[in-house]
Amino acid sequence: MNINETEPTVIKVEKLVKSYKDLVAVNQVSFTVKKGEVFTLLGLNGAGKTTTIEILEGIKKPDSGYVEIFGFDITRQPKKVKEKIGVQLQDTDFYRELKVKEICQQFANFYTDPMSPGELLKWVDMEDKRDALIRELSGGQRRKLALALALVNRPEIIFLDEPTSGVDVKIRHSLWEMICDLKKRGMTVFLTTHYLEEAESISDRVAILHKGNMMAIDTPQHLIQDKSWSINIKFKTLNPLAPGIITAGSPRFGNLKSAGGFYILEVNEMEQAVIDLINLVKENKNQITELHAEQNSLEDIFIELTKGD
Amino acid sequence: MKNLSILLHETKLMLKVFIRDRQSFFWAYVFPAGLLILFTSLFSQNNAAIAGGMLVSIIGIAVMAGSLFGIGVAIVTAREAGIYKRYKTTPLSSWIIFASHMLTRTITIFSSIILLILISVIGYGVQLQGNIVSSLLVIIIGIFTFCALGFVIASFAKTMGAALGITNVVFMFMMFIGGIMPPNMMPKFLMKLAMFMPITYFRIALQGAMLDGASIFVFWKDILIMLGFMVIFAAVSIKWFHWERTS
């Protein structure tokens, strides 16, 4: 999963700023992406994900800061960049009166070494739709076509802005399989998504944006492990616990809360903390009747980093 | 060469969009042909000269409708769908998108004019003794002027509904005051209002070129005023027009 540190940097973003009137959409954001990496931008609605990705795609101009893709400045040499990137926008449509194969051929014409409509449609399993008009396609099929068109120029980096939002579960799974396939082929994938579990499973690194600010960038595993109290022990006791005895009972214990009939104890190390807890409860003439221990997920980290102003 | 090939391919696709879209087809062919048949049948009294005047008026309307609806409404619709935004992520230059729209409109409007001429010549015995070069020049200046007005509408209309509403008002207003109603039948204030509309000068120039066979130098003032309108519309569009949706 981890990307080789020796791979060259293909995207370099430095102190990017973009405002809309009084709203600062992106505030001093910096990061780099290595070749072959799957890099995911996470954030709530309005976090600045789409603004950031659209600056990288050459659609929007930043107020200040610098974006370099393959060594080319996106604001000064946009055509050089656009030849080598593939893009799927969050909400794009096509001329509804055109056929699928005509749209594929149209986009192929924009580039020097394009894939043929047949190759593209085979990849998204839509060969039977080549003569269908765009208006005859379902929302999910249009999304698959948009993903296919992002590959028409055999790009080295593909930008996908919420590729699976608003589609049914079946299409969502098939889109994620396609994205996994891109990753296997060694393509650099830059994506934004709302689906944290999918981001956790596919991404080499994730960046969490909140109100235009970069809150964290790392591998999903490091983000989770770096949290001081990264494990939750959920347990029930025979009798209610006396307040205060648990949190003071071991240096491995963090906060204790209760929810759904369980006590939930944050701990920083699993095995010894469980032993400490069992002993402590016994010493207090009580008994544990049920116990589960679980590692925090990316979702927990995300919620924690995006909860404040 | 690559750009020229892309331009031709884009124009071909735009023509396919036009042919497969019922609304475009209606405004380009059915509406002007219907108007021509209606007005000529009602008012020409089998007089080929009056029918010729009708033909010129309806050609003026066809040029205006094709340009305003073909540019204003069509561009806002495509912009709303995010089509141009997607193009912006490709190496495609925006001048190609602009040129393909203009080329498509020119082709569809000329095809509409040919249909109107055929109806008048075959159906009502109109004899065209016009100056072909002058007529072509006037029509092309007309297309460019009204397309520029279409870009002005697309500059300010944020949604397809707004674009359709504005275009309908502008179109109907100009059609009745400057396009169909004979100037001698109009009240004075409407005559004055018509002086501020490009369709008035377009009709005068078109009549001179198509019916009287006059050279473009005979009605140079009307041509100059139309070019003036075109420059103003183009300047406003250059300042305010945008290919992407405003958020």
Image (cartoon, rainbow, N blue to C red):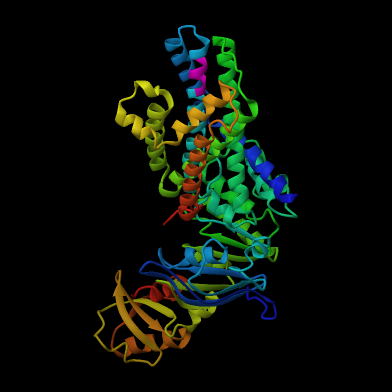
Q: Can residue A174 be spotted in the picture? A: no
Residue found 61% across the figure and 30% down from its top: B134
| Picture quarter with the C terminus of chain B | bottom left
Residue sitting nearer the eye, A172 or A140? A140
- Which percent across, then down, holds residue B118? 60, 17
Q: Please report the bounds of the magenta region as a residue range.
A: B51-56
User: Residue at the front extreme?
Assistant: B218
- Which percent across, then down, holds residue B63? 52, 31
Residue found 35% across the figure and 34% down from its top: B193
| Image quadrant where residue A89 sits | bottom right
The answer to whether B169 appears left or right of A180 in the picture is left
Residue sitting nearer the eye, B81 or A162? B81
- Which percent across, then down, holds residue A307? 35, 73
The answer to whether B192 appears left or right of B232 in the picture is left
Residue sitting nearer the eye, B60 or A11? B60
Main SS of the magenta part reads helix
User: Residue at the top extreme?
Assistant: B46
Residue sitting nearer the eye, B218 or B17? B218
| Image quadrant where residue B123 sits | top right
Q: Check residue B52 for magenta coloring.
A: yes
